[in-house]
Image (spheres, rainbow, N blue to C red):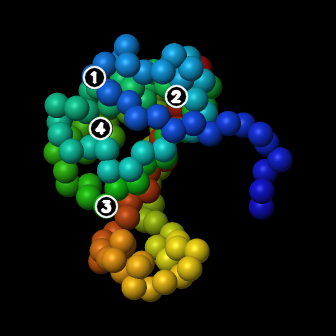
């Protein structure tokens, strides 16, 4: 079902360690939904990533959706704990099979296998972090 809402969707590459590089249009703490995938690789970058999320996420119920295949990476546990310590509630689930279907318009199986070859060999973990109302 399509929403009649005309809220803009913006995509930005961010240097988590350099707040001065962030576009001023997104640094107001009013981003309702942030989406990230496979962001945690190093314990050293957990604090800057958490800082980035907290600075961007709406103070009144903003939601951060995160997907990863690997929950054993350095810093992952600290990342989840840090967001919870900052007042975000966390829920997690395994991605449903429908999320792993061929997304290509052509439904070309060869192209799908080329670009998404490991999709059925991995488990995708979906996390939802919600900022409690301020």
Marks 3 and 4, how far apart at CA: 15 Å
Secondary structure type for disc 1: loop
For label 2, the crowd category at 10 Å Cα-Cα, with few meaning under 14, some 14 to 19 and many 20 or more, is many
Tell me which label, 3 or 4, sits earlier in the chain: 3
Q: Is residue 45 left or right of residue 105?
A: left
Q: Position of residue 115 (x, y in %)?
A: 36, 71
With respect to residue 27, does 90 lie above or below? below
Q: Mark 3 or mark 1, which is nearer the start of the sequence?
A: 1
Q: Can you identify the residue that label 3 sits on?
A: 69
Residue at point 46%, 73% (across, down): 100
| Residue farthest along the right direction in this orientation | 4
Query: Percent position (x, y) of residue 64?
Result: 49, 40
CB of mark 1 within 8 Å of CB of mark 2?
A: no
Quarter in which the N terminus is drawn = bottom right
Labels 1, 3: front one: 1
SS type, badge 3: loop
């Amino acid at each position: 079902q399509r929403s009649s809402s005309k809220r803009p969707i913006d995509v930005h590459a961010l240097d988590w360690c350099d707040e001065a590089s962030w576009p001023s249009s997104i640094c107001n703490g009013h981003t309702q939904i942030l989406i990230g995938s496979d962001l945690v690789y190093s314990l050293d970058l957990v604090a800057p990533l958490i800082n980035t999320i907290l600075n961007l996420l709406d103070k009144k119920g903003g939601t951060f959706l995160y997907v990863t295949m690997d929950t054993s990476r350095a810093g992952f546990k600290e990342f989840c704990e840090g967001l919870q310590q900052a007042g975000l509630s966390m829920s997690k689930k395994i991605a449903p099979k429908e999320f792993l279907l061929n997304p290509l318009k052509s439904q070309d199986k060869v192209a799908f296998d080329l670009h998404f070859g490991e999709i059925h060999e991995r488990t995708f973990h979906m996390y939802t972090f919600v900022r409690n109302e301020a």
